[in-house]
Amino acid sequence: MDELFIGAIQSPTAESLCSELPNWQIENGKAAFLDYLYRLYDRDNVPHGLRGTYTGLWEQFQRDVAQIHRASFICATAPNYTNPSYL
């Protein structure tokens, strides 16, 4: 990972990870990822209105990833709340 001038870690971006791929391959990958999310969230067995659709899958994934990341951070730093070294 790259470091910013203030010393913080900078996460890789989608652009930097995919910079060597042609656009068509990136778009195919996005479509394949949405198919993966469709299966992950079992869209064939959800209430009528969402069944068989891709509506809201990306947003649901974003919420889930954010909650998992926050929980992971809390668990990893819980003993250090009085002396946070992660700042």
Image (spheres, rainbow, N blue to C red):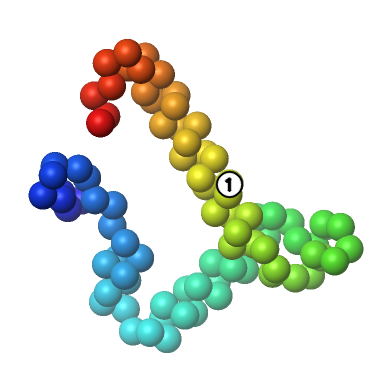
Left or right placement of residue 65 versus residue 4 in this view: right
Left or right placement of residue 74 versus residue 55 in this view: left
The residue that appears at 27% across and 74% down in the rendered structure is: 19
Query: In the displayed image of the protein, which residue is found farthest to the right?
Result: 48
Q: Position of residue 39 (x, y in %)?
A: 68, 60
Q: Position of residue 43 (x, y in %)?
A: 75, 61
Which of the two residues, 28 or 77, is positioned nearer the viewer here? 77
- Residue matched to label 1: 64
The residue that appears at 47% across and 36% down in the rendered structure is: 70
- Above or below residue 70? Residue 26 is below
Residue 49, visible in the rendered structure: yes
Crowding near the residue tagged with mark 1, few <14, some 14–19, many ≥20 C-alpha atoms within 10 Å: few
- Above or below residue 80? Residue 15 is below
Mark 1 belongs to which amino acid? Asp
Query: In the displayed image of the protein, which residue is found farthest to the left?
Result: 5
The residue that appears at 41% across and 31% down in the rendered structure is: 73
Which of the two residues, 13 or 27, is positioned nearer the viewer here? 13
Q: Secondary structure at mark 1?
A: helix
- Above or below residue 78? Residue 32 is below
- Above or below residue 26? Residue 51 is above
Residue 37, visible in the rendered structure: no
Which of the two residues, 28 or 12, is positioned nearer the viewer here? 12
Q: Position of residue 87 (x, y in %)?
A: 25, 31
The residue that appears at 27% across and 29% down in the rendered structure is: 86
